[in-house]
Amino acid sequence: MKLDNPPVITLADAMLSDTSRPGFVEPWQAELFACTHELCKRGLFSWSLWVEVFSAEIAAHPQAHEETIEQAYFRQWLAALETVLARKAVCRPEDITALAARWRAAYLHTPHGQPVALEHDAPPCAALPHDTPRGVPVAVSMPGNPS
């Protein structure tokens, strides 16, 4: 039986339906995918706006030589979502940049074996015990000079 209008299968559809390999290479890719769909479902933006912005991002920043198709796809997806969020005034580009910098710092300062969390976005101070809550003032005195 031949269909007059065969269904259009996107890379996203193929990734979700292909059970021979994982749909996402990295967990953040699945979270990005899910967040985008949920934000659209909640009415933050229309799917037609998403397609317009995502298509423009793909055209403006195609796959680089050193990237796999999946790496390029999710890099483009993330950039498109950031563009949509900025257009809808959900957040400013500088807020996204600052938050990305905090996550990068948290990754670099998270002790091995612990989950990355924003509370690790600054290097720990060697003079403070690890159980000292952040934001609580501490007294500092020089050795031999009691305070």
Image: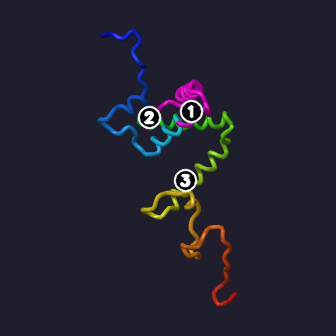
Residue 3 colored in magenta in the image: no
Nearer the observer: mark 3 or 1; the answer is 1
Of label 2 and label 3, which has the lower sequence position? 2
Q: CA distance from mark 3 to mark 1?
A: 27 Å
Question: Is residue 3 found left or right of 137 in the rendered image?
Answer: left
Q: Which residue is mark 1?
A: 40
Nearer the observer: mark 2 or 1; the answer is 1
Q: CA distance from mark 2 to mark 1?
A: 32 Å
Q: Residue at x 51, y 58 (%)?
A: 108
Give the x, y percent position of residue 4.
Answer: 39, 9
Give the x, y percent position of residue 141.
Answer: 67, 83
In the picture, the disc for residue 104 is 3
Question: Is residue 44 found left or right of 114 in the rendered image?
Answer: right
Residue at the far front in the pictured view: 42
- Residue type (three-letter) at the residue carrying disc 3: Arg
In this view, the residue in front, 141 or 1, is 1
Residue 23's place in the image compared with 48, above or below, is below
Residue 54 colored in magenta in the image: yes
**Main secondary structure of the magenta stretch:** helix
How crowded pointer 1 is (Cα within 10 Å; few <14, some 14-19, many 20+) is rated as some
If the image is split into quadrants, where does the C terminus sit? bottom right
Nearer the observer: mark 2 or 3; the answer is 3
In this view, the residue in front, 145 or 90, is 90
Give the x, y percent position of residue 8.
Answer: 42, 20
Q: Which residue is mark 2?
A: 65
Magenta residues (range): 38-66
